[in-house]
Image: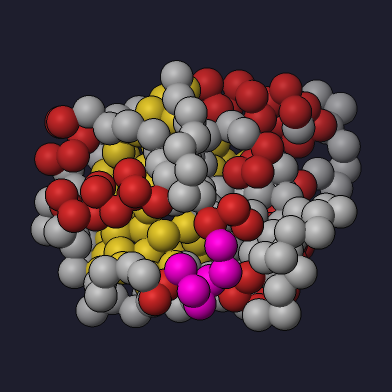
Amino acid sequence: MPVIGSTHPVCLSDNPKDKRLRVSVLIEWNGNSFVIDCGPDFRQQMLNNHIPRLDGILYTHEHNDHTAGLDDIRPFFFRQGAISIYAQTRVIQSLQKRFGYIFEIENKYPSAPDLDVNIIDEKPFYIKNLKVIPIKVMHGKLEVFGYRIRDLAYITDAKSLAEEEMEKLKGLKVLVINALRKEPHPTHFNLEEALAFVKRLKPQKAYLTHISHLMGFHDEVEKQLPENVFLAYDNLKIELK
């Protein structure tokens, strides 16, 4: 937000919390930095938060708003070497089509970044000795991954989850979950669905993300939420102990 050319009141808001770049999260621990998703605003997000190092990218799925910033890892590559990426086979194949010059082996473009490609499935895996549990989520008819890392779960673009995936989300301190708008949507939770999801899982705190202007003004919506549920906003920082 704002949407290009829109005259919707939320798009015209002066509140910084009503101005949102594409959804992503940076996870930092013990000097390590990983992002979940690398969308079209990746460069600006890294600049806004003064991020000097990137150890890797975890992808939820292949849609443009979650992948289009891949080329902008170049400054990190120039300083650090190959950058690790983690994604399902289908997502890697999509990236190879869209960013062929990065994945090319012979006659590779000289300044294209190198990648350390890690194909993942539903099994837990490790990044720098930190356990990551994939959560299978249905984004309409498309299977995407959310991730649980210790007592934090990050899920975006969800419309439904199987019972066995819900079991992986018990005992959370923080849940980040998508809530696109108040009206129903065919491939995303709306506000009512997201709040029902939070109520069922009972995390200590929940943050709603992937929010459109149709949700309403940030400050007005947040007043209507349960006491442990908040609207996320750009550059929000959460510390887990």
Residue at the (25%, 75%) spot, across then down: 227
What residue is drawn where x is 49% and y is 74%?
220
Whether 217 is among the magenta residues is: yes
- Count up the numbered dots: 0
Left or right: residue 203 versus residue 40 is: left
Name the residue: 33% across, 68% down: 225
Question: Per the image, is 54 magenta?
Answer: no
User: Where, quadrant-wise, is the N terminus in this rendering?
Assistant: bottom right
Residue 48 screen position, x and y as percent: 69, 76
Up-down relation of residue 226 to residue 196 (above or below): below
Is 170 drawn above or below residue 206 in the view shown? above
Is 26 positioned to the left or the right of 166 in the image?
right
Coordinates of residue 69 in the picture (x, y in percent) = 71, 49
> Is 130 situated above or below 100?
below
Residue ID at (49%, 35%): 185
Q: Main secondary structure of the magenta part?
A: helix
Q: Quadrant of residue 145?
A: top left
How far across and down, in percent of the image, does residue 3 sit?
76, 54
Q: Which residues are magenta?
A: 216-221
Horizontal side of residue 136 vs 237, given as left or right: left
Q: Position of residue 160 (x, y in %)?
A: 32, 32
Q: Is residue 21 visible?
A: no
